[in-house]
Image: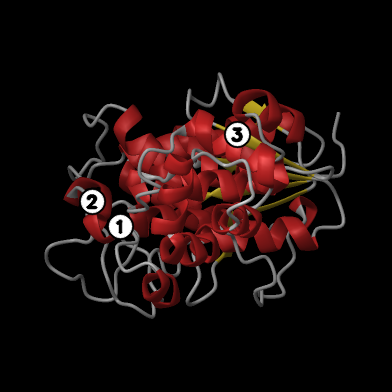
Amino acid sequence: MTHDSLMVFDTASLYFRAFFGVPGSMRAPDGTPTNAVRGLLDMLARLVGQYRPTQLACAWDNDWRPPWRVALVPGYKAHRLASEPGTGSVGAGGVGAQSGESEEAPEELRVQVPIIRTVLDAAGVPVVGVDGYEADDVLAGLARRSDVPALVVTGDRDLFQLAGPDTKIIYVARGVAKHDLVDPAWVQEHYGVPAERYVDFAVLRGDPSDGLPGVKGVGEKSAAQLVTSWGGIEGIVAAAADPASPMSPAVRARIVGAGDYLAAARRVVAVVDDLPLPGVSLRVDDLRADTERLADLGRRYGIDGPISRLMAALAPGT
């Protein structure tokens, strides 16, 4: 049964996951790799079929490493930069980046990203990106402005910060079939912090995959304890500076020593949910597929099956 809801996909997170999860032997008739394309389309088809959203969109990384975030934390995603800058490419093949920096990615994935974009366009699926912002920000903006409950599909735990009364995270780290449905109670149970404090917790803990070191000597348990005791980063820093607070000398020294990082990193990790979004209809009923183009893409790349499954999932009344 269909319930009014918005489903938004963290596209790059999903196509990276598809690339490494689907056998690389999947090829087009001309030898072009198609495992990421096939995997992504099947993920979309399965989740749309399961949840039956009335609105949907694929968020795009117009800039996977925005300059304004790098200015705050210079090491942000620095280890993921491609050794040779791509021409107008970013996020393993997306376009429109202000930085012009390419993300390190296998060439067999890089060549598939334009194909993914082409197939989504032909299927009529709205692809939403904003120059100077990451897909995470786009997802946050779409969810926050939605007038119906939102489902955010991702493999990135940073987006747990969006969990709230009207937003749930479909977390696919264990696979689409075994995904977790993350709400504020789930975040509290798994991390010991309220969802609205997940950003503070994540900043303290750090995330090596994003080049965020965290506070030395502070792991998940101690980060949760700090958040529970003093709230957000501001309160924790204030407690560390207050000789009368019961914070231990060792932790106090770590927090004081990381003061500059903590102030900057919170702005980096927190998503921007008030960015200007293009005014496109996200309603599934309004999607208009180019069937001839889809048929041609299906033949060219040998992906008739995944395309058919996606279109069946998007069909009205299914």
Say which label, 1 or 2, has the lower sequence index. Answer: 1
Q: Which residue is mark 3?
A: 225
Secondary structure beneath label 3: helix
Rendered residue at 44%/34% (across/down): 219
Q: Is residue 294 above or below residue 61?
A: above
295 sits left or right of 78 in the view: right
Q: Nearer the viewer, residue 231 or 39?
A: 231
Task: Give how far across and how far down residue 189 sits, in percent.
Answer: 68, 23
Disc tally is: 3
Task: Give how far across and how far down residue 250 sits, in percent.
Answer: 42, 41
41 sits left or right of 232 in the view: left
Q: Nearer the viewer, residue 236 or 120?
A: 236
Q: Is residue 84 above or below residue 33?
A: below
The amino acid beneath tag 2 is Ala
The amino acid beneath tag 1 is Ala
Rendered residue at 44%/77% (across/down): 68
- Mark-to-mark CA distance, 1 and 2: 6 Å
Secondary structure beneath label 1: loop
Q: How many residues crowd mark 3 within 10 Å: few (<14), some (14–19), many (20+)?
A: some
User: Do callouts 3 and 1 mark residues in contact (Cβ within 8 Å)?
Assistant: no
Classify the position of the N terminus by image quarter: top right
Task: Give how far across and how far down residue 125 sits, in percent.
Answer: 61, 55
- Mark-to-mark CA distance, 3 and 2: 37 Å
Tag nearer the camera, 3 or 2: 3
Secondary structure beneath label 2: loop
Residue 22 makes an appearance in the image: yes
Q: Nearer the viewer, residue 213 or 150?
A: 213
Q: Which residue is mark 1?
A: 92
Rendered residue at 76%/29% (across/down): 185
Q: Which residue is mark 2?
A: 105
User: Do callouts 1 and 2 mark residues in contact (Cβ within 8 Å)?
Assistant: yes
277 sits left or right of 255 in the view: right
